[in-house]
């Protein structure tokens, strides 16, 4: 399907020499080594094929050139005169379209396609021969499961849409693609199931993406998130990331919208609430009872990691709050460093170790762990910088953070924990109570796409709360989550 030229774009001229001069200036021929052009004469007409090395499959290009050369020899015998139509009929490819401006043609070429200019024609023939450099769809490191699929999203948006389509063979599934970034022209795909998703939600996301006016999406999905949700200084994640196609497919069937950004292996799930970030695929790969046990263990670990350090600090600073049976709680040894500063230094040390682990090559990770455990931990205790209990509770808090399925939520909870620790150190018991209350009020006030962040607790939705607290068997779940306002709320019909 041909496109109508815009006012600020350059239409393709019938004079191929003029097109060549303009394209060489635009694409930097002679400077950029990866931009190529192949010139042919087919049926006495000059033809040029433009491409980018590294983004195209060279075998496809060779096949196209062979077919064009064969066309020249066969066309002369049959005295064919309609060169453009003859070329189209002899292109051995399934995806062929036309563009009428040089801007559209170059954008397609820089996306990995090739375009052909024919002397005397006012449109270019665009052929999809993309072959992006990419890795295979391997299992994501942050979302591993004991049982389940081992494929994961990659940096190739074409592969990602195929991985999702493989799981949902519904003719009503839609993959809308657009380009964002005045210079990067990054491909973004909006995926949803027509007939389930709320059309207003799709329209909101589409308008937010179209309103992005930036030269390039260097950080891909993260930049898109900051534009569409207006997070500001809020540390809590307002969208969910996943690299698992089965997780994305599950949310599509519930009525969510998936946003895929080219060059990123993570897809954005929206709208989401706080409780979407504490679910994990492993819960649904086990029996319902085991899944519920795993879920509750994770919930307890998250709450424990958030409150254990502030609460222990409160009891340490106010030993009179302890009953006689628990008077052993608190540091048995005294040091020259206050407990409050010990906790802050230990939290800083854990954060530095986490950052070092990310930047440390895998073969050296074991050595890093030994250094952290033996040299830093043991010697720091023996010297007197830390008491053993401080190291214990800081480690328990770190384990709870690492057990949080959402990496972004784990870091946000760590920041909240430090806030509570400071509040307890300054105001003691009132600081703990007021700080915890402010934290809850803050979560209540958060909305993402006008959806309450603490749903289904606030507002109260008993059936949805049951689905949060208990991992129900799949046959017993008949309705989709009401938070997404699905057009078809019934997931499976009752017999």
Image: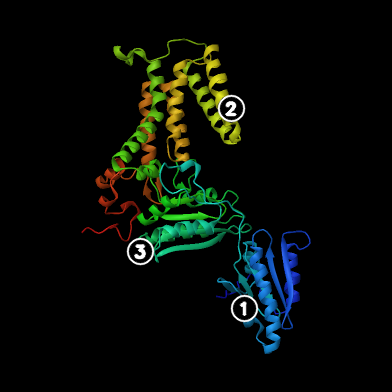
**Alpha carbon separation for disc pair 2 and 3:** 54 Å
Which one is in front, 322 or 384? 384
User: Whole-percent x and y of residue 418?
Assistant: 46, 28
From what the image shows, is residue 94 above or below residue 28? below
Residue at (35% x, 45% y) in the render: 284
**Cα distance, mark 2 to mark 1?**
61 Å
Q: Quadrant of residue 307?
A: top left
Colour pattern of the rendering: rainbow
Q: Which of marks 1 and 3 is in front?
A: 1
Earlier-in-chain disc, 2 versus 1: 1
Q: Residue at label 1? A: 90
Q: Distance between the residues labelled 1 and 3?
A: 39 Å
**Image quarter (top left, top right, bottom left or bottom right) of the C terminus:** bottom left
- The local secondary structure at tag 2 comes to helix
First of labels 2, 3 by sequence position: 3
Kind of element beneath mark 3? loop
Residue 260 visible in the snapshot: yes
| Nearer to us in this view, 417 or 495 | 495
Percent position of residue 124, x then y: 64, 74
Q: Residue at x 38, y 53 (%)?
A: 250
Residue plotted at (34% across, 38% down): 295
In the rendered structure, find residue 367 and report the number of the disc placed on it: 2
Residue lying at 61% horizontally and 75% vertically, measured from the top left: 91
User: For residue 195, which numbered disc appears in the image?
Assistant: 3
Q: Which residue lies furthest to the left in this view?
A: 495
Crowding near the residue tagged with mark 3, few <14, some 14–19, many ≥20 C-alpha atoms within 10 Å: few
Which numbered mark, 2 or 3, is in the foreground of this view?
2
Task: Assign a secondary structure to mark 1.
Answer: loop
Do we see residue 470 in this rendering?
no
Instruction: Give the number of marks.
Output: 3
């Amino acid at each position: 399907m041909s496109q109508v030229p815009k006012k600020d774009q350059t239409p393709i001229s019938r004079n191929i020499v003029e097109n060549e001069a303009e394209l060489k200036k635009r694409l930097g021929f002679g400077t950029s080594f990866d931009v190529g052009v192949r010139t042919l004469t087919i049926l006495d007409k000059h033809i040029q094929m433009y491409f980018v090395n590294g983004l195209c499959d060279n075998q496809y290009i060779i096949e196209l050139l062979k077919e064009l050369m064969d066309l020249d020899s066969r066309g002369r015998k049959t005295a064919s005169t309609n060169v453009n139509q003859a070329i189209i009929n002899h292109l051995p490819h399934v995806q062929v379209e036309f563009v009428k401006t040089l801007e559209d043609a170059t954008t397609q070429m820089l996306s990995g396609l090739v375009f052909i200019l024919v002397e005397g024609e006012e449109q270019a023939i665009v052929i999809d021969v993309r072959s992006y450099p990419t890795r295979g769809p391997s299992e994501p490191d942050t979302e591993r499961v004991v049982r389940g699929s081992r494929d994961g999203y990659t940096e190739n948006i074409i592969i990602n849409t195929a991985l999702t389509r493989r799981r949902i063979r519904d003719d009503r599934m839609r993959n809308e693609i657009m380009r964002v970034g005045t210079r990067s022209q990054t491909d973004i795909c909006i995926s949803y199931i027509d007939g389930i998703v709320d059309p207003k939600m799709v329209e909101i996301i589409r308008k937010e993406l179209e309103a992005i006016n930036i030269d390039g999406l260097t950080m891909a999905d993260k930049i898109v998130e900051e534009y569409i949700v207006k997070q500001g200084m809020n540390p809590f994640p307002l969208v969910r990331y996943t690299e698992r196609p089965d997780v994305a497919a599950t949310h599509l069937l519930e009525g969510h919208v998936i946003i895929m950004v080219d060059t990123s292996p993570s897809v954005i799930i929206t709208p989401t609430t706080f409780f979407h970030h504490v679910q994990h695929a492993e819960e649904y790969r086990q029996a319902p009872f085991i899944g519920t046990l795993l879920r509750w263990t994770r919930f307890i670990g998250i709450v424990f990691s958030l409150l254990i350090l502030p609460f222990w600090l409160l009891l340490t600073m106010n030993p009179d709050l302890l009953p006689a049976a628990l008077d052993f709680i608190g540091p048995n040894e005294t040091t020259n460093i206050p407990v409050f500063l010990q906790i802050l230094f230990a939290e800083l040390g854990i954060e530095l170790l986490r950052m070092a682990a990310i930047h440390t090559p895998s073969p050296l990770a074991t050595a890093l762990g030994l250094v952290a455990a033996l040299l830093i931990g043991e010697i720091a205790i023996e010297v007197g910088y830390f008491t053993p209990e401080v190291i214990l509770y800081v480690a328990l808090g770190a384990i709870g953070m690492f057990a949080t399925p959402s990496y972004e939520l784990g870091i946000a909870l760590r920041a909240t924990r430090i806030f509570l620790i400071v509040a307890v150190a300054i105001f003691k018991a009132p600081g703990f109570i007021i700080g915890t209350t402010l934290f809850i009020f803050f979560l209540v006030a958060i909305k993402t796409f006008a959806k309450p962040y603490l749903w289904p607790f606030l507002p109260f939705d008993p059936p949805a709360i049951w689905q949060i607290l208990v991992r129900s068997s799949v046959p017993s779940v008949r309705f989709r989550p009401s938070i997404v306002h699905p057009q078809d709320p019934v997931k499976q019909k009752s017999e």
